[in-house]
Image (cartoon, helix red, strand yellow):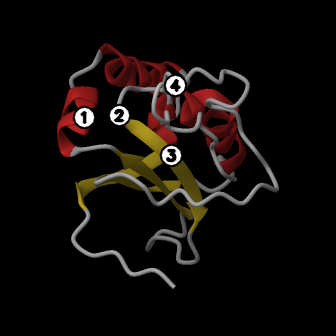
Amino acid sequence: MVICRAKPATSGEPAGNDDSIAGRICPNEKLTIMSGDAVYMIRFWVKPGSEQKVLDWLDGGHIADVVQQPGFLWARRFTLEEPDDEGWPAFAMLYGVESLEALKTYFESEAAKGYGAERAQLGLDALLKMDRNWGVTALTVER
């Protein structure tokens, strides 16, 4: 799954005004999306049997909503191979962000608080174990 976003502005064009692309889930499209100086990583484990409920919430709008927040550029969701010690399946989210400052602003935003409240209201907190990390690009190697 790739989350699409509007193309960055070129000289004289406004950025991000292509609503037909922004935030849409774009299957079967290949995009180079490793832009941004910062990343936000969420590794999470889902209680066995609850995977569909959690993934439906993520893929049903949450991921696209986060990518629409100021400073966010792209997102990818991964299925990881190794479960935790209790057999809970593992997944990860990786978000590209313009800067750590943009990410810190997001952490303090009403949107971020709202996502936590929504997750709790839907009963997802009891179905998840999460580990969050963030940082800046230290090295890029391209083929």
Few, some or many residues within 10 Å of mark 4 (<14, 14–19, 20+): few
| Mark before the other along the chain sequence, 1 or 2 | 2
Look at mark 4 in the image and give the residue it sits on.
13
| Mark before the other along the chain sequence, 4 or 2 | 4
Horizontal side of 52 relative to 37 (left or right) equals right
Q: Quadrant of residue 20?
A: top right
| Mark before the other along the chain sequence, 4 or 3 | 4
> Are dots 3 and 1 in contact, CB under 8 Å?
no
Horizontal side of 7 relative to 95 (left or right) equals right
Horizontal side of 13 relative to 35 (left or right) equals right
Q: Nearer the viewer, residue 14 or 66?
A: 14
Disc 4/disc 2 C-alpha distance (Å): 18 Å
Judged from this view, the residue extending furthest toward the bottom is: 143
Look at mark 2 in the image and give the residue it sits on.
71
Number of numbered discs: 4
Q: How far across and how far down the image is residue 116, in percent?
A: 38, 26
Helix or strand or loop: what does disc 3 sit on? strand
Amino acid type at circle 4 is Glu
Q: Is residue 43 above or below residue 114?
A: below
Disc 4/disc 3 C-alpha distance (Å): 20 Å
Look at mark 1 in the image and give the residue it sits on.
102
| Mark before the other along the chain sequence, 4 or 1 | 4
Disc 4/disc 1 C-alpha distance (Å): 22 Å
Look at mark 3 in the image and give the residue it sits on.
74
